[in-house]
Amino acid sequence: MFLTIMPEIKEHLYKQKVTFGSLTSLSESVSKDAGATSLQHSMVSALRQMCCPRDKTDEQKRLEQEMDPKQIEQMKQLSNPQGNQPSEKEEDGAVLKGLAAQLAQDDATLVVAELVAHAPEGAKGVLLSSAQVLLAFANTDSVRGKMVQQGGFKAALALVLSDNKPTQLAAAWALARIAISINPALYPRRTGSGPEGMVKPMLQLVDEADNELQQFEACLGLTNLATVPELRERIVTAGGWRTLQMALTCENPMVQRAALECLSNLVAAEGVVERFTDADSTDLKIFIGFCGSEDEKCQIAAAGGLATLAEVPEVSAALIRCKGGIDAFVELAIVAEDPAILHRAAVALKHLVLNAMDLIVGKEGATPPDHAMPTLGALTVLAKSGVAPVKQAALTAIVELQKRRPDIALPHPDLVAQVVDNLRAEAARRAAEAEAEELAAAQEETLRGEQGDFSGITEEDEDDADVPEGTVEDLGEVV
């Protein structure tokens, strides 16, 4: 336990690629000597010190928020001009993460699971350290399956029930990381320790997170859980729709995207459709707005959710009546290049034509609405797509239109070409403006940095810059 305090020892273990052998015997020792609190404390402390960063004082945290490492070191030297106090060696995050992965690979999860199961009442230190160790293990996606197999999942579920807030937070975050990678069907289905127990802690993590990385990973985990019907219903019943909707207000685009993808997976849950049947629905406007996002993955999620909902006639009618509803899909159909976006646009337009044909092209004998020609032009463009599902959806809509409304003719190719050119020119203009704004913001940020303005730069901001293991791409395609 003492040796694991020293950064040099940890660095040596990591660089030499030391393995710890199977730690099964240690887990057996815990179960046999359940009353030996000193043994429990020593083991969990050694594990924690090998894979978790040292606790920092509030003063250290404040300094790191206000200054960069070089400035902090300069301040220390100024406060100690004699130089007789050596600088404390900084711990390397890569070393801690590597040791955590090796420990988990060597069955250390069994040890932590037994520590949690046999911890005496009131052993807050042991439980907190256990939760932090599980969180460190779960930072490596390749060991998350083994953690579930060896009881780490069950231990984390027990730890989120702790009355100690830091323990709850660390355990919930560990569950979120596990949920990102594991197929929900593979969790143990025991009473009180199934995947449904993850929902409330992860929603609470989204709502009360200390930083955006916690929100991001919790949203990713919930997105994966929402692929299972009963867990989808559980999320909605637990107030998940509102929690995730509030996460969309986060300024971090990665958090926004993860929350939107989860909401898109939830649209099939009972009671959600009613949120979209009114043309003035806030939810409907939010999804339509994200269809025009600069982030293609946000476009996929929003368009996918609306394409699914448009199968309901009442939602189709609301979508057509909502300002910008039809325009969003027409623009995606003509401007987008990603096959996934084109497919969702084609399916949505197909449902709109089949479910609300009179609203799309007008009643027989009446003057067609303004959106009729652009909509039919978009379908004409999609019908020529080289992507088979896109072409099939568009042709289905066109054939049904000609069958039920022979009085409606498809627009002339020249008119379609003009609409396409106009929309693409407008999209290019907006992209150029957005690029110019980003460049100006980057230049301003650089200028502030040169002037020594470090306000608002936090340790969490650096963490958020890198996508952790187990991102949206690992979860498969959203609806």
Image (tube, rainbow, N blue to C red):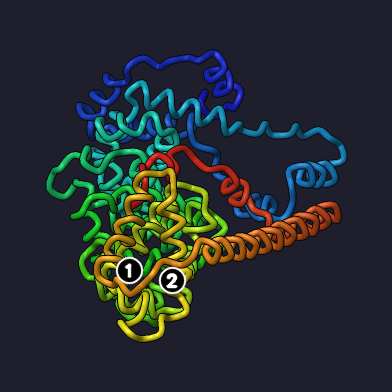
Identify the residue at horizontal 54%, vertical 66% (top origin): 415
In the picture shown, does residue 399 fall above or below 186?
below
Where is residue 161 drawn, in percent x and y?
28, 54
Circle 1 residue:
352
**Amino acid type at mark 1:** Leu
Q: CA distance from mark 2 to mark 1?
A: 9 Å
Compare residues 116 and 235 and report the one nearer the observer: 235
How many numbered circles does the render carry? 2
Identify the residue at horizontal 19%, vertical 46% (top origin): 193
* Residue 462: image tag: none
Q: Residues within 10 Å of mark 1 (few under 14, many from 20)?
A: many
Any part of residue 173 in sight: yes
Circle 2 residue:
326
> Would you identify the image quadrant in which residue 456 lies?
bottom right
Compare residues 215 and 41 and report the one nearer the observer: 215
> Would you identify the image quadrant in which residue 387 lies?
top left
Identify the residue at horizontal 56%, vertical 66% (top origin): 419
**Amino acid type at mark 2:** Ile
> For numbered disc 1, what is the local secondary structure?
helix
Any part of residue 256 in sight: no
Give the side of residue 435 with respect to residue 124, left or right: right
Where is residue 202 drawn, in percent x and y?
35, 55
Mark 2 vs mark 1: which is more N-terminal? 2
